[in-house]
Image (tube, helix red, strand yellow):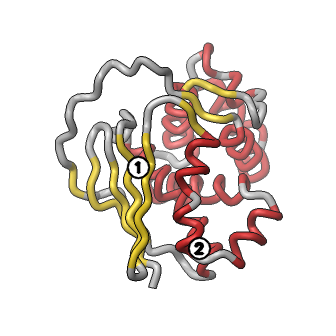
């Protein structure tokens, strides 16, 4: 799952631009947690986050920008409190959160789009959902997609590796109508490469 080969990255520089993520992720996560687990579990997740970051889960706005630390803490807490430390449960939660975030229109559009098209749209989605360091590139050839993240200093955190699988996998599943065949093949402190079998 997230056990791709760990390689050494060039040590990350001190980033001059702060990493931020759109509030849509928090809105989707909050909606999923409240519906599936109830307000008590959602409150426990919010309470376990550092006070200065709680607003991201307590009252998120979909188009607002939130610091990367809020996402990192939300992932950490959900992994501990809701997934109970299980990487498999966390991956399922991230996949379900992605599906909650894809509205009906886009779900319909993805069903008629090819998996290749869905992968090629990832860099634009990345730019829409994030600002700050990080580059995402996709190569598609011969029923194989290669997704490369670079200059993004969070991949030593297992939750970010799970997030890649949990965000990209559902897009491929909707496009192909079958379970995604996606794996991480290499990662380091600032990079990650994943491969998708599109055959």
Q: Where residue 122 sits: x, y (%)?
A: 55, 56
The numbered mark, 1 or 2, whose residue comes first in the sequence reads 1
Q: Quadrant of residue 115?
A: bottom right
Q: Which mark is residue 172?
A: none
Number of marks drawn: 2
Q: Can residue 53 be seen in this view?
A: yes
Give the image location of residue 61, x and y in percent.
78, 31
Disc 2 is placed on an element classified as helix
Q: Which residue is drawn at 45% across and 48% down?
A: 136
- Observer able to see residue 1: no
Q: How far apart are marks 1 and 2 (CA)?
A: 18 Å
40 vs 99: above or below: above
Residue that badge 2 annotates: 173
Q: Where is residue 159 in the image (x, y as percent from the top left)?
A: 44, 44
Q: Quadrant of the N terminus?
A: bottom left
Quadrant placement of the C terminus: bottom left
- Using the image as rendered, state which of residue 75 and residue 34 is in the foreground: 75
Q: Quarter-wise, where is residue 43 in the image?
A: top right
Say which residue appears at 69% left-offset and 70% top-offset. 110
């Amino acid at each position: 799952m997230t056990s791709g080969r760990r390689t050494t990255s060039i040590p990350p520089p001190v980033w001059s631009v702060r990493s931020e993520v759109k509030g849509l992720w928090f809105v989707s996560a909050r909606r999923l947690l409240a519906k599936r687990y109830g307000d008590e579990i959602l409150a426990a997740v919010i309470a376990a986050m550092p006070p200065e970051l709680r607003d991201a889960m307590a009252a998120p706005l979909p188009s607002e920008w939130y610091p990367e630390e809020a996402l990192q803490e939300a992932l950490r807490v959900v992994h501990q409190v809701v997934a109970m430390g299980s990487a498999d449960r966390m991956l399922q939660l991230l996949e379900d959160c992605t599906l909650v975030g894809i509205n009906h229109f886009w779900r319909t559009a993805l069903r008629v789009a090819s998996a290749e098209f869905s992968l090629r749209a990832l860099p634009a989605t990345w730019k829409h959902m994030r600002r700050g360091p990080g580059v995402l590139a996709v190569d598609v050839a011969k029923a194989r997609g290669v997704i490369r993240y670079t200059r993004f200093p969070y991949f030593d955190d297992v939750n970010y590796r799970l997030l890649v699988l949990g965000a990209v996998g559902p897009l491929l599943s909707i496009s192909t109508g079958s379970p995604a065949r996606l794996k991480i093949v290499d990662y380091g402190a600032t990079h990650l490469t994943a491969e998708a079998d599109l055959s």
